[in-house]
Amino acid sequence: MKTEHEDLGPDAERFGRIIEALDRRPVRLPARMRAAVMARIRAERSSAWARTWTWLAEPRLSPLAAGVALAAGIVALLLFRPQVQTGSRELAGARSVTVAVRLVFLAPQAARVAVTGDFVKWDPTGIPLVGPHENGVWSVELQLPPGLHHYIFIIDGTEWRPDPNAASQVDDGFGQKNSVLLVPVQKVS
């Protein structure tokens, strides 16, 4: 009768002898050795990134502490965010002043014409134009800060039309066009 190792060849037989020769009892290390190994592991601190990742992956914050930390982060973001005026950007070295801008629109059959844009946060009532003047021309003079402004005319409260006299028009994201007005910086000495 063949032994268990005879089918596997000479390498398996040698391996079997090695396994039989090994002592399979658990090894117990002295307590002071375990303490020395653990002290050495603690002395080798991981990198700041590894500690941060461990802290994020296994947070030990209470829900109250997490809420307070989140609220503090939001307050910090609100306090230290850059201040940019809607519709315009101040250019370095220029004082923040408004510039008089005159807009005109031809609408002879209109009973009412207004203008709206980023300078009035796209208010649907807009700023009313004066008119109609001769030949159905409506006009308004606005005080706008320097920068790029998007706007559109509102005819009789329902029809929104871009300015045909504008130097540029852009897509409004809703399938229509907005007029673009560049208000130059006025240097004040």
Image (cartoon, grey):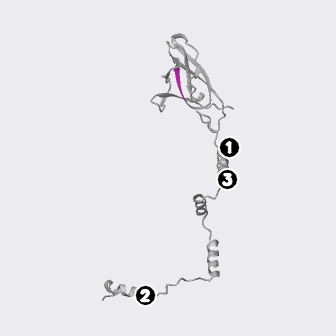
Q: CA distance from mark 2 to mark 3?
A: 58 Å
Instruction: Give amino acid for label 1.
Output: Leu
Q: Quadrant of residue 33?
A: bottom right
Q: Position of residue 81 (x, y in %)?
A: 64, 43
| Image position of 17 (left or right of 99) | left
The residue tagged with tag 3: helix, strand or loop? Answer: helix
Q: Quadrant of residue 149?
A: top right
Mark 2 and mark 3 lie on one chain; the one further toward the N terminus is 2
Q: Which residue is mark 3?
A: 65
The furthest residue to the top: 134
Q: Residues within 10 Å of mark 3 (few under 14, many from 20)?
A: few
Q: Which mark is residue 79?
A: 1
- The amino acid type, in three-letter code, at marker 2 is Ile
Residue 142 percent coordinates (x, y): 61, 23
Q: Which residue is mark 2?
A: 18
- Say whether disc 1 or disc 2 marks the residue closer to the N-terminus: 2
Please state the extent of the stretch shown in magenta in the rendering: 150-154
| Rendered position, 60 above or below 70 | below
- Main SS, magenta residues: strand
Q: Quadrant of residue 16?
A: bottom left
Front position among marks 1 and 2? 2
Left or right: residue 2 versus residue 182 is left
**Residue at left offset 60%, top offset 36%:** 89
**Marks 1 and 2, how far apart in space?**
72 Å
3D distance between C-alphas at marks 3 and 1: 21 Å
Residue 61 magenta-highlighted: no
Residue 53: image location, x then y, percent: 58, 60
